[in-house]
Amino acid sequence: MSEFESDWRQSLLALLENAAINVRIAGAAIEQWHISAEDWQRFAELAKQQRLRWAAGWAEHLGSDFVVNACFEKQGRYLWLKTTLTADNLELPSQAGLYPAASRSERHSQDMFGVNFAGHPDSRPWTRHKAWNKHQYPLRKDFPLPGEPEKQTPPDIDYNFIKARGSGVYEIPVGPVHAGIIEPGHFRFQAVGETVLHLEERLGYVHKGIEKLAEGRSPEALTKLAGRISGDSTVAHSWAACRAMELAAGLAIPPRAGFIRALLCERERIANHLGDIGAICNDVGFAFAQMQFSRLRELWQRSQAETFGHRLLMDSIVPGGVNTNLSDEHCALMQQEIQALRAELDELLPALDLNSSLEDRLLTTGFLSTQTAELFGCLGYVGRASGQDFDVRRDAPYPPYDHLAFKAAVETQGDVASRLWIRVKEIFAAIKLIEQILQQLPGGDIIAPWRRPPEHSEGLAMIEGWRGEIITYVRFADDNRVSRFYARDPSLLNWPALERIVLNNIVPDFPVCNKSVNGSYSGHDL
């Protein structure tokens, strides 16, 4: 810990002492701060004073008790907050009034465990629709994996959406079924004329029971499950799950495996950014760009299928390493592929940059201020396009990024144009990282033998996926089986920002605003 980094930690500890809040500190890599439940909200107030970012929250059923966790971050240093509740008093003061980013996470824990977050500004259910009743809690240990579902799940028709009334105000319900091959989500607009006054999201339609399905799995089976949280982030989520398990087990992977993992993650970043750039252009009628960038993405993914056996790189990462080695021929072909991609981008990007119609549609559209992005804890290209200068690869580097030179692109314009062009910059940054990886690729093994973790050992890992920071928690039982798994996709923090981004824009611009954020429904709903 540097002297500069320790300043906020010492200041926070002093504030806690003055507030008579007792803290028991444990852990090494990421400190665990244990406090009493009654101090939960007061801690958030003091953390807010120190400008810590709320990063994740999850709960856990342990024996007769429930443990509630929250993760904060500042300057690349994480703080893991814990408190324990008994089954006869499952109430905790909410942190969501201070940190809006915590709102949906607390509602999720309320639905899944029955924890009552007192003072929460929005007590409506979030993940629970009608697939189980309000007195059932699927992540308690006594809840069966298949649940007790009715033959047909009733429609969620009594969800109390916020209303807006006034002269000329009308409502537009959109989804959850959309006119396209996308996942379900509901968007409730209030508008006047063509101007959006208010947007409310309703998600949770693709809740798959990922956390429940994880219980009892082996490390290999959990990795496969994590790789299916969100298909376009299969590398990042499987890497985060493996890293959390490896930290819990005290397992160091071979250096070559770390470099190949990073190469896979950067390839995933490039593929998704290429697709998104084309899709943003398509949403404002620039079909030529959509076709060209889709073509580049297709070529990139075909190459991945040839080298790694899967277009999306699914199941390439395994506990202890990776399952595919790279030959000298593979490395040489990848160098040629990068040169070809650079040449294509050099020819195509001026067509975007000099297109006045595209500029007219994207500039100032879907503005997200730096203050709002900070308030919601926005991540990845959404946060960095609005001045949030944070990237796990640089600020909390993990192997091999601690050996690679890397510059994160940051802008402050905060509009759709900025979210498009920051993707372009991230493609070029990823290309440079791949070149470094290929030049520095160490020899040796690509997988280490699995080490059985101690009973109740925990791991908390952060990985910078293409959408931003992923935080994954794993606890093991006594038989090398997973007892608890939680994965916080960056979409959990970026989706709420869309409700602000679209305000005062015209309704027809919602698709391009939405695409510029491109939150994962599946990654959010778990």
Image: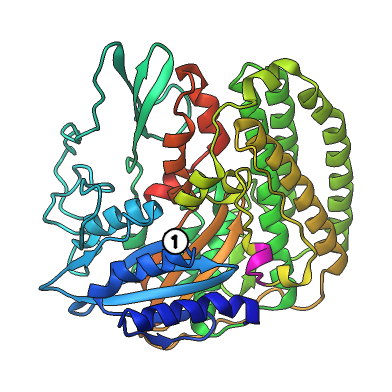
For image coordinates 56% across by 51% down, the residue present is: 233
Residue 124: give x, y in percent of width and height. 21, 45
- Describe the colour scheme in one phrase: rainbow
Quadrant of the snapshot with the N terminus: bottom right
204 vs 258: above or below: above
The answer to whether residue 496 is above or below residue 40 is above
- Residue at which label 1 appears: 54
Secondary element at tag 1? strand
Coordinates of residue 349 in the picture (x, y in percent): 80, 30
Magenta segment boundaries in residue numbering: 393-398
Residue at position x 25%, y 17% from top?
166
Q: Position of residue 431 (x, y in %)?
A: 80, 51
Which image quadrant for residue 337? top right
Q: Is residue 277 left or right of residue 216?
A: right
- Which kind of residue does numbered mark 1 sit on? Trp
Q: Nearer the viewer, residue 481 or 518?
A: 518
Judge whether 275 appears above or below 14 on screen. above
Rendered position, 48 above or below 500: below
**Label 1 environment density (alpha carbons within 10 Å; few <14, some 14–19, many ≥20):** many
Tell whether position 122 is magenta.
no
Question: Where, by quadrant of the figure, is residue 40 drawn?
Answer: bottom left
* Residue 507 in sight from this viewpoint: yes
Q: For residue 395: magenta? A: yes
Asked whether, in this view, residue 144 is left or right of residue 425, the answer is: left
Based on the displayed image, in which of its 4 quarters is residue 344 positioned? top right
Residue 231 drawn at (x, y percent) = 52, 47
- The mark tally for this picture is 1
Q: Nearer the viewer, residue 520 or 201?
A: 201
